[in-house]
């Protein structure tokens, strides 16, 4: 069912493939590419080109019930499903499952990419586990339906786009358990105060000390109780008034009752500690070796339940780790 090129690819990489996913491109004419990811390299294995009405896949072999796919693979056209989006979803899931089987990858861990437009109707409800899109799509109203239909999604990766980005305040994605924003900018402050997931990684941030203090206050009052870790790297082009956070921590360490963090106890421990970071973010981002060293950092202890978290902060970053 595959060309010589594909067979060679399979033999070389069958034990190396990290991910099998689907990338959806186009607006009127939709293209669905089933790809494999090996490290940072991505290769399309099968590409489906749908007609504008989404009834069938384009057929380059006249009067024959076959679809010609990338690498000269041929798979019979499905005739047992309804037309439109139902047919498109069936074709996409069928090919994805086939490629996953070839490369010994669990097909239930469906990864999808939307580099141009969020076509949420291309996938069955509850099937998407990882979603990658560009930051220009974060204001798209289609995201409401996407996240409403894909409640099993456990990772959202938002890549930096080449186009002009509208830095809005939409937070449709705040309930996704793990979120990576490659170009967070002002959205970093939105997510710091509204995130209801577990792990966040924010790059190219426009951090503000006021919003960091708000996060600490919300966590101290049990209003961000799912939070396990938040790592935010400041943009090199924007200063971060981190001293504003240090002032509040030092003031509370002196037991000031007028402090906004009066629901916390602040400590500064000297012993060497390594935070046991276990997020799937490590599969998407390579951290510096000392990222999780917590010796000499501020600890905050919640009065209500004794929960402890460590704060690492400088002009270049803000990190918040909740200890198990």
Image (spheres, rainbow, N blue to C red):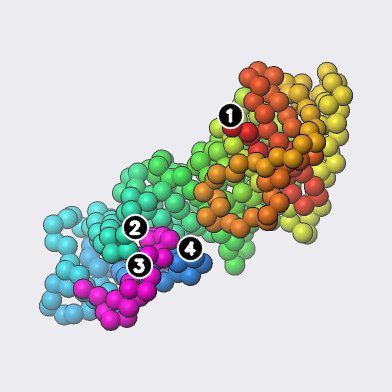
User: Based on the displayed image, in which of its 4 quarters is residue 78 positioned?
Assistant: bottom left
Q: Counting residues from the N terminus, which is met first, the one under dot 3 or under dot 4?
A: 3
In the depicted view, which residue is nearer to us: 258 or 137?
258
Give the Cα separation between the discs numbered 1 and 3.
41 Å
Part of the protein shown in magenta:
1-24
Tag 1 and tag 3, C-beta contact below 8 Å: no
- How far across and how far down the image is residue 102, in percent? 28, 64
- What label sits on residue 225 in the rendered view? 1
Whether 288 is drawn above or below 259: the answer is below
Quick one: SS at disc 3? Answer: loop
Name the residue at 62% across, 63% down.
Answer: 164
In the rendered view, does 258 fall on the left or right side of 289?
right
Give the Cα separation between the discs numbered 2 and 1.
33 Å
Name the residue at 27% across, 60% down.
Answer: 101
In the depicted view, which residue is nearer to us: 101 or 214?
101
In the rendered view, does 260 fall on the left or right side of 21?
right
Tag 3 and tag 2, C-beta contact below 8 Å: no
Discs 2/1, front: 2
Discs 4/1, front: 1
Give the Cα separation between the discs numbered 4 and 1.
32 Å
Mark 3 sits on what residue? 14
Tag 2 and tag 4, C-beta contact below 8 Å: no
Discs 2/4, front: 2
Q: Counting residues from the N terminus, which is met first, the one under dot 3 or under dot 2?
A: 3
Q: Counting residues from the N terminus, which is met first, the one under dot 1 or under dot 3?
A: 3
- How far across and how far down the image is residue 147, in percent? 44, 44
Mark 2 sits on what residue? 105
Residue 172 in view: no
- What label sits on residue 115 in the rendered view? 4
């Amino acid at each position: 069912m595959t060309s010589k090129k594909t067979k060679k690819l399979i033999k070389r990489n069958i034990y190396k493939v990290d991910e099998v996913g689907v990338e959806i491109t186009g607006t009127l004419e939709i293209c669905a590419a089933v790809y494999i990811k090996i490290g940072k390299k991505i290769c399309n294995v099968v590409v489906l080109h749908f007609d504008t009405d989404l009834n069938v896949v384009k057929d380059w072999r006249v009067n024959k019930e076959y679809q010609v796919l990338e690498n000269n693979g041929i798979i019979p056209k499905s005739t047992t499903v309804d037309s439109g989006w139902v047919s498109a979803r069936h074709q996409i899931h069928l090919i994805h499952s086939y490629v996953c089987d070839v490369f010994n990858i669990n097909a239930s861990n469906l990864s999808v990419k939307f580099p141009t437009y969020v076509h949420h109707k291309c996938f069955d409800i509850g099937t998407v586990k990882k979603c990658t899109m560009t930051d220009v799509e974060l204001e798209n109203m289609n995201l409401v339906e996407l996240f409403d239909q894909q409640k099993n999604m456990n990772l959202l990766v938002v890549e930096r786009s080449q186009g002009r980005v509208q830095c809005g305040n939409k937070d449709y994605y705040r309930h996704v358990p793990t979120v990576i924003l490659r170009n967070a900018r002002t959205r970093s402050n939105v997510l710091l105060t509204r995130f209801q997931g577990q792990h966040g990684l924010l790059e190219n941030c426009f951090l503000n000390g006021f919003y960091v203090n708000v996060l600490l206050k919300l966590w101290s009052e049990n209003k961000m109780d799912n939070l396990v870790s938040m790592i935010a790297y400041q943009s090199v082009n924007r200063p971060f008034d981190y001293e504003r956070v240090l002032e509040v921590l030092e003031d509370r360490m002196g037991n000031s009752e007028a402090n906004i963090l009066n629901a916390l106890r602040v400590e500064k421990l000297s012993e060497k500690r390594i935070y046991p970071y276990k997020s799937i973010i490590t599969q998407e981002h390579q951290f510096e070796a000392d990222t999780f060293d917590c010796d000499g950092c501020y600890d905050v202890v919640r009065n209500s339940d004794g929960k402890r978290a460590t704060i690492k902060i400088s002009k270049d970053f803000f990190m918040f780790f909740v200890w198990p």
